Image (cartoon, grey):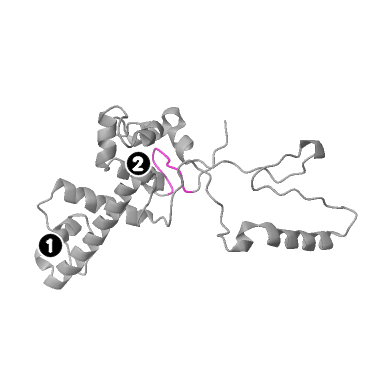
């Protein structure tokens, strides 16, 4: 079986004994990518037209996300791995001279083994400092090589809240913002009875929901450029 690597937790299906979840894939950022894509009106129209429209190139990769459930979509044709898996880097190993060829982000060294290991280690660190991108002001964590890399900070709880309030407001547009937040279970300093909420608490709750909806809208719109979670 081909080895596959993801930058973030990939979705798993079935019961998770460790997390006690019937749907452990809800803890994967890739699930929310799929869910927010389904909220993009332009992409929906593209799917309804069989892949035609200004998001046609996106459709070629993601396909119809409305006709099947997430598990089927992710597993059919290894869709999830195709879209989000990282390209595995070259292994750290000795390369015979006759097999050396130019590769991006690979540095070949000639190391005289007759010298002491401590000296060689010090020289290696000097070379690494001069050539590694992390030494030139760039981030030092692994650069994503996925076809569709996740952009920015990932907070699964925040993504789940954005999805809940956004879909709740779409389904029940007559609800006020604080009512949306209350129905979605956003925490306040009072109990579950809406009549116990003070005016100030409703105001705070409404502002919270407003920020979440605005962020959700930016993420939904970001799919035109294949970005997630796009918050700017």
Rendered location of residue 170, percent (x, y)? 17, 47
Q: Is residue 186 left or right of residue 61?
A: left
Q: Label 2 belongs to which residue?
A: 34
Q: Residue at x 50, y 48 (%)?
A: 7
Q: Is residue 28 visible?
A: no
Q: CA distance from mark 2 to mark 1?
A: 34 Å
- As for residue 10 lying within the magenta part, the answer is yes
Rendered location of residue 186, percent (x, y)? 23, 60
Determine the residue located farthest toward the front in the rendered image: 54
- Secondary structure at badge 2 equals helix
Q: Label 1 belongs to which residue?
A: 193
Q: Residue at x 81, y 50 (%)?
A: 110
- Secondary structure at badge 1 equals loop
Determine the residue located farthest toward the right in the rendered image: 114
- Split into 4 quadrants, where in the image is the N terminus? top right
Rendered location of residue 205, percent (x, y)? 20, 65
Q: Are marks 2 and 1 in contact (CB under 8 Å)?
A: no
Rendered location of residue 40, percent (x, y)? 27, 42
Residue 82 image label: none
Give the camera-side residue of 30 and 108: 108
Q: Is residue 83 visible?
A: yes
Q: Which residues are magenta?
A: 8-18
Q: Residue at x 22, y 48 (%)?
A: 167
């Amino acid at each position: 079986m081909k080895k596959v690597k993801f930058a973030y937790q990939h979705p798993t299906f079935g019961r998770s004994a460790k997390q006690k979840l019937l749907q452990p894939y809800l803890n994967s950022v890739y699930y929310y990518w799929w869910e927010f894509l389904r909220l993009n009106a332009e992409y929906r129209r593209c799917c309804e037209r069989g892949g035609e429209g200004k998001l046609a190139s996106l459709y070629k990769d993601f396909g119809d996300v409305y006709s099947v459930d997430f598990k089927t979509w992710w597993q059919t044709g290894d869709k999830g791995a195709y879209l989000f898996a990282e390209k595995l880097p070259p292994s750290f190993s000795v390369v015979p001279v006759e097999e050396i060829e130019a590769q991006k982000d690979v540095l070949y060294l000639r190391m005289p083994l007759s010298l002491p290991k401590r000296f060689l280690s010090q020289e290696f660190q000097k070379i690494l400092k001069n050539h590694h991108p992390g030494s030139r002001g760039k981030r030092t964590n692994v650069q994503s090589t996925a076809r569709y890399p996740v952009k920015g900070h990932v907070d699964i709880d925040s993504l789940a809240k954005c999805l809940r309030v956004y879909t709740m407001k779409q389904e029940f547009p007559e609800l006020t913002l604080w009512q949306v937040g209350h129905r979605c279970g956003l925490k306040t300093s009072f109990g579950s009875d809406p009549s116990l909420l003070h005016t100030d608490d409703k105001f705070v709750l409404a502002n919270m929901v407003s920020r979440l909806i605005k962020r959700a809208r930016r993420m939904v719109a970001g799919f035109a450029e294949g970005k997630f979670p796009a918050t700017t």
